Image: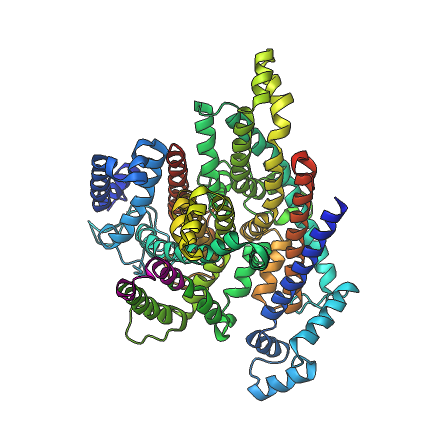
Amino acid sequence: MEPLGWPAIFTQMFLQFTPVWLGLILIFFLSIRFKRNLSLYGKLMDSPIGMVGLGLVLFWILTALFAEQVALFDPLEQVSGMKNAKPGEFLAGSETQVYLLGGDNLARDVFSRMVYGSQTVLAIAPVATIFAFMAGITLGLPAGYYGGRMDTVLSFLANLVLAFPVILLFYLLVTPEMQDTPIPMTLAGVLFIFPVLFLVMLFYSRFKARPDVLWIYLAAVLVPGLYIYFGLAFGLVPLGPVELTPNLLNIFVSVVFVNSPTVFRIVRGLALDIKTRDYVAAAQTRGEGPWYIMLWEILPNVRGPLIVDFCLRLGYTTILLGTLGFFGLGVSPESSDWGMTINDGRRLLSIHPHPALPPALALISLVLGLNLLADGLREQSMKD
Amino acid sequence: MPQFVLKRLGVMALTALVLTFVVFFLTNLGPNLEKLAKEQNNMRMTDEQVASWLEEEGYNRPLVVRYGEWLAGVFTGNLGESSRFGAPVASIVGERLWLTAKLMFWVMVVMVPSALLLGVLAGMREGTFTDRSLSTLAITTTATPEYVSGVIFSVIFASSIVGLRWMKASATSATDGITFENFALPVMTMAIYGMGYIARMTRASMAEVMTAQYIRTARLKGVSFPQIVVRHALRNALIAPFTVIMLQFPWLLTGVVIVETLFNYKGFGWLLVEAAANNDIQLLLSCSVVAVLVVLVTQLISDIGYVYLNPRIRVQ
């Protein structure tokens, strides 16, 4: 068979993404239809930049969800004769099966690897970012609210981590040797408790006067929370789906560790600003406890900047994960992680550029989408 | 002012001490030492042999004691011996650092003026078409990490596929002499990622200054628009970006490591990778210390410079 030309390749790729397009159309239709009832998210529909950003992000989320339908091959499948195949080349003796974006140096389909690569990024980055936010919020609120010695100590620790060049930290933490030491587990034990702690404080401060409601909430948080905590941090849950390989745990911990001090600084600054407001004084006069004020008065009022920063940080985390993959410290040697694929592809760049370019463009578009989304959200939330 | 500087210096010294200890701890972990023992002797050592070798070499003494010894060495200029290169660490680091300094210099020369120009042009007329397109451009560059832009630029400017072949995809020859051909790609790759961030800061700061009262007064007085931008707005608008530029250094270090790996330029970043990959404990330690010190010194300069440039917060 003659290889496909570029117009045919793009048509075929467009068709492969059909479930993603349908999902996008549905989401945007519903969002625009009900935008009046969707508060900040609904207002995003008035900002062209925000809509483009949201579209790009949703595109990759849907691609990750429908990866099996979108991809043509298994990301690890090697087909003989397809080593470094040019884009649009058909499999030997086949009239239908085609490597749309060519093959890499191990004869795997570049297109399918790019599609599956989105799963790795979107499985790790959001969870790691949420964990970093939980840690940053749980420590940043009291630091800003109380001030004093605790603030000095916590800020010093945060600055300590921030003074550490990220790449150095990765080279020291994400190593095979590190997996034999208790350090990743200790760090995980400390960092992963924050989400549980955060939720417990959230409900405790609100319902402590009503024990009958309180224990329901606490049970709903603690049972799954501690189950996931022990599973993720210590691998102690034999039954569960929540377990990380030592390397993945290492990556996860490092990414959370790098991100949380910045979140801490932002939250601390916001808390410092908000605590002088009248409604905080009113709550203090009412006799509310400090944690109630922090979590139910201050936090809801700083959600705007935090949501914006969340999007930006998600993009940054995506870049970090790519950096790790690029240095071969990534998830697993065979994974279709974008950073890793770029690193594999760059060795033969001057002769075969096609394996390196698709994951590179995919990474840009996702991060760009997140940045544009953040920009749109910032613009819309400032209009209030 | 001197008191402020002294206080900052004190915090900086404390930070450096803690961080070097952390690095010392992380590079001297059991598994690392075991690997070192096997590399120094032979790979098939038994556990007992490893233990006795470590005992002989003094690795079993308390960590704090060894850290103290190392620190004393640092102050007397003795950074130890590199196991990867078989030479004193100090001379290796110095030589590589100089190569990276040259790279950084050119990155700064390209990045800072273009970022400031971009930011000022976008921020002086907020909300216009120019502003929107320049801002989107800035966002795009911040979304393009070095390992992505480097790959794309190599394909466009240095591969036989596109056929431009303006530059070389390897900067190895730049060690002997810098030419446009071998240095443009690494410099461009690094400058672009940092540029967007500085440009956005400049834009925000410029946009804020342009709404200030004294700018309105100048306008009502009949000063021409270019005059307002250059003589009145610029000076105040550039305070915030100055801090940001100084704080870019820690970011640039990650960029240095990526770009030097990507373009095979044997500078400080390459050295860091070599040290980490070969378990060269002494070298990795010194590289880390240099990296941490660079970050801390730039933070200090940015703090002091900010106070100096901005009379309103000149220390009470």
What residue range appears in magenta?
A: A197-215
Q: Nearer the viewer, residue A46 or A357?
A: A46
Question: Can residue A145 be seen in this snapshot?
Answer: yes
- Residue at 48% x, 67% y: name it: A187
Residue A70 screen position, x and y as percent? 24, 50
| Magenta-drawn stretch contains B272 | no
- Residue at 36% x, 60% y: name it: A199
Q: Nearer the viewer, residue A16 or B310?
A: B310
Residue B258 against residue B79 in the figure, above or below: above
Residue sitting at the far right = B76
Residue A123 against residue A269 in the figure, above or below: below
Q: Nearer the viewer, residue A249 or A266?
A: A266
Left or right of residue A162, residue B4 in this image: right
- Residue at 55% x, 76% y: name it: B31
Residue A176 screen position, x and y as percent? 49, 70
Left or right of residue A181, residue A332 in this image: left
